[in-house]
Amino acid sequence: MNSKVRIALTKGRIESKAVELLDRIGYDTSELKNKGRRLILSIPNEDIEVVLAKAADVITYVEHGVCDIGVVGKDTIMEHGGKFFEVLDLGFGRCKFALAGKKGGSFYDGYGVKTVATKYPAVTRAFFESKGMDVDIVKIEGSVELAPLVGLSDGIVDIVETGTTLKENGLDVFEDVAPISARLIVNTVSMKLKQERVSEIVRLIKENCDDKNN
């Protein structure tokens, strides 16, 4: 096992907020801010490496133990699952999963099986199963807002931050599905074998994160 503590960050907006958090702790984040095309970076004067990855890969790296700690959105955790400890709500990257459809419509009208388009089939399936509803789920890779507009689906389940994209495409939120924010996850073995150092980093993150109520 690598003697350093390796932290996987989700590239993009969560990455920039996570770097701000590491700044607040007092870590030297100069390499992270001037990373170029590098994907593995060091924090000077600390036994910490930072790995930059796509969200789903953050979970994979932490689950398989090549990274000890990860910062990833709750949306990815809900969709992909995995064996790790989810230890902290970091309080940034807040948005929600929502059920949406054509403005003025009603998703639950009628008796036929509804079709739902989404990038998140596992989340969607779990939501409707909790309601005891059987729905047809269509996996979409691109702009899921198109699906109800072209008649592919009765509604969509997607991540909503401000709702602007929905409104611009004539869609409305029908119902909130689940809140989302960035979470801190830890490899189950690292929590034992690197317990002292990992616990110290988690404590520092907890003391400096946006959500002080955790």
Image (spheres, helix red, strand yellow):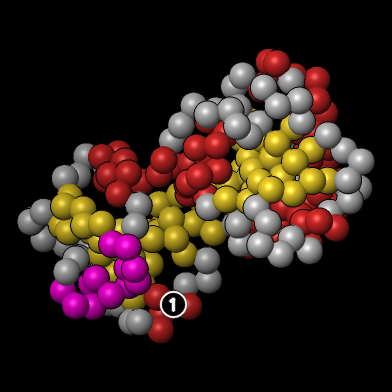
* Residue at horizontal 92 percent and vertical 41 percent from the top: 45
The range drawn in magenta is 140-151
Image check: 187 left or right of 128? right
Above or below: residue 198 compared with residue 162:
above
Q: Position of residue 37 (x, y in %)?
A: 66, 62
* Residue at horizontal 47 percent and vertical 72 percent from the top: 163
Above or below: residue 81 compared with residue 39:
above
Quadrant placement of the N terminus = top right
Q: Position of residue 91 (x, y in %)?
A: 68, 50
Q: Residue pushed farthest left?
A: 112
**Residue 24 counted in the magenta span:** no
On the image, which quarter does residue 47 sit in? Answer: top right
- For the stretch drawn in magenta, the main secondary structure is loop
Mark 1 = which residue?
165
* Residue at horizontal 34 percent and vertical 68 percent from the top: 142
Q: Please tell me which residue lies in front, 25 or 171.
A: 25
Image check: 49 left or right of 133? right
Image check: 159 left or right of 142? right
Q: Tell me the amino acid under the disc marked 1.
A: Thr
Above or below: residue 121 compared with residue 110:
above
Asked whether the viewer can see residue 20, the reply is no
Q: Position of residue 137 (x, y in %)?
A: 21, 53
Q: Crowding at label 1, few (<14), some or many (≥20) Cα neighbours within 10 Å?
A: few
Q: Position of residue 209 (x, y in %)?
A: 77, 47
Q: Please tell me which residue lies in front, 149 or 201.
A: 201
**Residue 143 counted in the magenta span:** yes
Q: How many numbered circles are shown?
A: 1
